[in-house]
Image (spheres, rainbow, N blue to C red):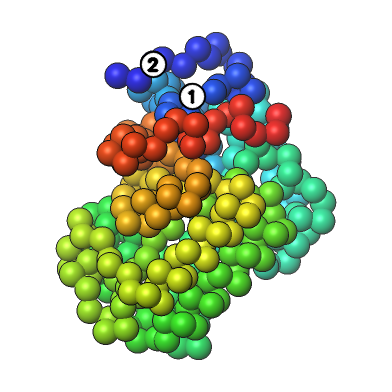
Amino acid sequence: MPPTPRILSGERPLSTHSDGLTIDWHSHSFFSDGRATHEAMIAEASRHGVVLGLSDHILMDNRRLRSVEELTGYITALSALPVIVGAEVSVGDVSDEAQIALASGVLGEFDYLIASLHQVDVPEGRVTAAAYLNWRFGMYPRYAPTVVEYDRRDYFDEWVRMLATTLETMPVRILGHFALFPEQADATGVSPAAIDPTCDPEPDSLAREWLDATIDLCLRHDVAIELNSKSRVPHRQFIERAAERGARFSLGSDAHHLERAGDIGFGRAILHELGIGTDRVLRGTDLKR
């Protein structure tokens, strides 16, 4: 059993919480596509000895949290509660609302931002992460790519460009639910990982080059790589490579339902198995305020 956090009602955990193994940085409430109130999510995580970071979708991913006024209201509402106040953005969000929010400085008022892989546009269409991540979660009986055939190099180049731009312009602290899709693992497009959700894609030299570029950007911008319990990503080989190169990590349930709040067991298990020390795990005391 993890230790019970020493948090009093209404006390902000950010500046005092130094144990990254008892923080769930990634969760969603009624403010976006979650199925429970923020108070209920906080209480459920606390019952498991876990401090909650609420990170509802904002900007292009949530029509209720786009304007500066809406974002400020969200921060104000949560700041009175024993929760770390975060938000989740899409890597590559260049919407008008994102530009206005950046110019206003409101994104810097969040305790942290998660930037997640949600979609990448290639000439053949939009490659989305939801199909693969939800299949890994068990929502679908089989995996069906959103774009059946596309040039991997185009995808890799566009992803790296999008990630670099996002990390250069937004105050991001966590890269959310990053994954290599099976059809991207090698030039044949054939991988056991496309039929077995417990199997990790084996990257060829081109894919490894792209994965290393992702790690490099996280290292350059001091961004932690999330170990996501919902979809069990990133894949083990990527985590091992990131750890070898000195990356930091964060734990996230990606909870959308009450019963999953505080579920960070996937990340804890991986850290233990790979012998990654707690000094490499994002803590509340690592943030700015």
Q: Would you say 104 lies left or right of 157 here?
A: right
Looking at the rendered structure, the secondary structure element under dot 2 is: loop
Name the residue furthest right: 104
Judge whether 283 appears above or below 107 on screen: above
Q: Are marks 1 and 2 in contact (CB under 8 Å)?
A: yes
Q: Can you give x and y, in whole percent of width and height, for residue 81 in the image?
A: 59, 23
Q: Would you say 230 lies left or right of 282 here?
A: left
Q: The residue under label 2 is which amino acid type? A: Pro
Whichever of callouts 1 and 2 sits on the residue coming sooner in the sequence is 2
Looking at the rendered structure, the secondary structure element under dot 1 is: loop
Judge whether 179 appears above or below 77 on screen: below
The residue under label 2 is 3
Q: Can you give x and y, in whole percent of width and height, for residue 117 in the image?
A: 49, 61
**Image point (27%, 74%), residue name:** 144
Q: State the residue in front, 242 or 169.
A: 242
Q: State the residue in front, 288 or 141.
A: 288
Q: State the residue in front, 11 or 155.
A: 155
- CA distance separating discs 1 and 2: 10 Å
**Image point (31%, 78%), residue name:** 186
Q: Would you say 40 lies left or right of 186 here?
A: right
Q: Can you give x and y, in whole percent of width and height, for residue 164 in the image?
A: 63, 65
Name the residue furthest front: 244
For the question of whether residue 23 can be seen, the reply is no
